[in-house]
Image (cartoon, grey):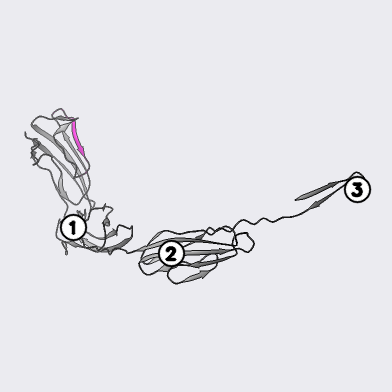
Amino acid sequence: MRLYLNDTAYCNANDVQEFTISISPLVKAGFSTPSLGCLPHRATFKNTSLAGQTFRWNFGDGSSFTGPNPPVHVYNRLGDYTVVLIVTDPGTCNLVDTTRFVISVKPKPVASFSFSPNPPKENMPTQFTNLSIGAKTYYWEFGDGDTSRLTNPLQLYERTDTFIACMVAYNEFGCTDTVCTKVVTLIKPVVDVPSAFTPNGDGKNDKVFVRGFGIAQMNFRIYNRLGQVVFESGSPSYGWDGKFKGALQPMDAYAYTLIVEFGDGTIVNKKGDITLIR
């Protein structure tokens, strides 16, 4: 602030006086922390208060702290906890402000599963059986790059090996638990193609698939008598339904070529005919 004094009757004509005024903001208590935690919950607090000289924290479980930045606080029991922060600043008009926030500490599920066959059997898919407690949804990693969100997935491994299979269990609060175990597999590479199929819509043998074990990669092509590729697949789970560009194909013998790379690195080439029967 400046005060100007002008008087033409004096030699100095005018004079200036400067004053410094400090205006302190009103104290405003505030902090942020997640409203939900999983037992045991390690709560962290970010102090967002405005102004303030002293800070008193009450964590709602009988413990407290004095200072602007409390350490990580661990809740070891389930329940709802009301955290209170009292902020004091003698240089402000309102002097004290208080804020409250409720943290809910929820239970974690217990992740568990078994698998079969154990010990492994040649070319048998691995069946995983979920034994978790208190979980609603699941996420599986089978150790070979494949994943699943099924409750009890069936996994066909591509090679003989020992894999680390893991399952993450989630409950309705978003709390998780993880369990992993070794899964030993025994795979003998083999591949075959059916000689005929009947795409008549009766739900039986309506598609032709490549069948086998240990298939890591494949290229399967089917040709009509004109040499056109009427179907191509790169996966044993994707088969031909007897259509080409949406049109049903006539009953006939169709040539195929198949290149397969097994999980152990060996490559097999096959050629033959498939009869479409209506």
- The type of residue carrying mark 3 is Asn
Question: 194 or 156, which is in the foreground?
Answer: 156
Toward the top, the furthest residue is 226
CA–CA distance in space, label 3 to label 2: 66 Å
Question: 278 or 4, which is in the foreground?
Answer: 4
Toward the left, the furthest residue is 278
Q: Secondary structure at mark 1?
A: strand
Q: Which mark is residue 126?
A: 1
- The type of residue carrying mark 2 is Thr
> Measured from the top left, where is residue 130 in percent x and y?
21, 60
CA–CA distance in space, label 3 to label 1: 101 Å
Of badges 1 and 2, the one in the foreground is 2
Residue matched to label 2: 82
**Range covered by the magenta-colored residues:** 225-235
Q: Which mark is residue 12?
A: 3
Question: 117 or 188, which is in the foreground?
Answer: 117
